Each structure stands twice: as structure tokens, then as C-alpha cells.
Amino acid sequence: MTIRNLCVYCGSSSGTRPAFADAGRRLGQAMAEHGIGLVYGGGRSGLMGIVARAVLDHGGRVTGIIPEFLRDRESVLRDAQEMIVVDDMHTRKRLMFERADAFVALPGGVGTLEELVEQLTWVQLERHRKPVLLADIDGFWRPLLTLFAHMRDLGFIRPQFEIRYLVCEKIDDALPMLHLAASRAEREGVAAAPLNPGL
């Protein structure tokens, strides 16, 4: 499984810690340098804009997917090579899934969380086999990881229905971890065409 395009979920604001913006810039630069295109929500503000501009600044390709009703609210990044305007959030998420070979969740708000959890659910239900990585910058995702452990302890995440995800604390580890996961899947013979998540 080759990672040609990476979907990045992240906030439309930058958050309060400089480490978040730094991680976005470093990830965007690394993607461009490795020839990996960005698939994201299409905005120019916050971490979304930081990642996208970093990809563009280093010669990479950006595909934004945004619903019509968010065009003004999130200020579309007009420099993107491809900007797809859709009717609703469901179509946006479906196209982001279809265009991407793997997923990274940077810090973000409720929308970022919702997108991440949906992908984890699809993986848990074996609707697709694309790698999903949580970039735990400055411990941002630690409360969610603690909640997952709590769910396991109380029997709501059972061993036969484990949720599979990667976690990195340093953004420079993100792409190597994703490539390793994709290579392992290919070696194990599970890298056939991704399953339809059934949106």
C-alpha cells in the first residue's frame, strides 16, 4: 500500500500552544518533500491553513474539500491546486476518505474529533484498512487515549473489536510510522482495495 495522499484532520484555529502550529508546519513540509499530497477541509485559517500552506510552500499538492455553507466561514484557501465544493458534510467526509490513503489527526476541536472517531469506527468494523494516526502533540490526545483505556476496562471495547490506531508524540515520526503500517499491511496481504465504509 503506497501512501500517495494523506488526509489531515485539524482545527480551524491554531490553539494556544506554539507546538501545535510548529507540528502543522513540519508535517506539511515533510509531506511535500516526500511527494505526499494533502487532502483536508479546505480552510485557510488555523492549523488547517498552516498545514496546507506548508505543503504549498515546499512544492506539494493540496486538495481541499469544503461544504458550500462553510466557504465564507472558514475562508477557502484559494492557492490550493484543487478545491472541491460539496453540498454537505457527509459528502465532504466521503470524498476525503476516497481521496486519502491514510489519516492523521492533529489537535483540533469537536469537528476534528468527530472525523477522527468516525475513521476509527470504520476501522474497528473492518470497513477499511487505511492507517489512522493520532499526533499527540504536547499530550493533546492523551485524554482521549485515557477514555479508550477506560472503555476497554469496562468492556465496551472488546478484544475482538479492538480499535486500531497509531500514536506519535513527535510529528517527525508520523510519516515513518504510517509508511511502516502500510508496508506491514501489504506484507500481511491485507492491502487489497479499501473496503467501502458505507456512507
Image (cartoon, rainbow, N blue to C red):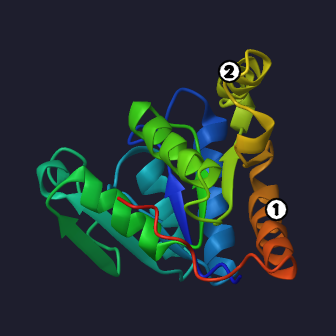
The residue shown at (63%, 66%) is 130
Q: Position of residue 1 (x, y in %)?
A: 71, 82
Foreground of the two, 38 or 92: 92
Foreground of the two, 186 or 51: 186
Three-letter amino acid code at disc 1? Met
Residue 59 to residue 129: above or below: below
Q: Residues within 10 Å of mark 2 (few under 14, many from 20)?
A: few
Q: Which mark is residue 25?
A: none
The residue shown at (25%, 51%) is 89
Three-letter amino acid code at disc 2? Leu
Residue 179 to residue 34: above or below: above
Q: Residue under label 2, please give it.
A: 147
Q: Which callout, 2 or 1, points to the residue nearer the camera? A: 2
The secondary structure type at the circle numbered 2 is helix
Foreground of the two, 15 or 182: 182
Q: CA distance from mark 2 to mark 1?
A: 23 Å
Residue 6 to residue 9: above or below: below
Q: Quadrant of residue 35?
A: bottom right
The secondary structure type at the circle numbered 1 is helix
Does residue 162 show up? no
Q: Which mark is residue 177?
A: 1
Residue lying furthest front: 160
The residue shown at (66%, 78%) is 3
Please state, as top left, top right, bottom left or bottom right, where the C terminus lies in the image.
Answer: bottom left
199 displayed left or right of 89? right
Q: Answer with mark 2 or mark 1, whichever residue precedes in sequence.
A: 2
Q: Position of residue 111 (x, y in %)?
A: 39, 38
26 displayed left or right of 44? right
133 displayed left or right of 85? right
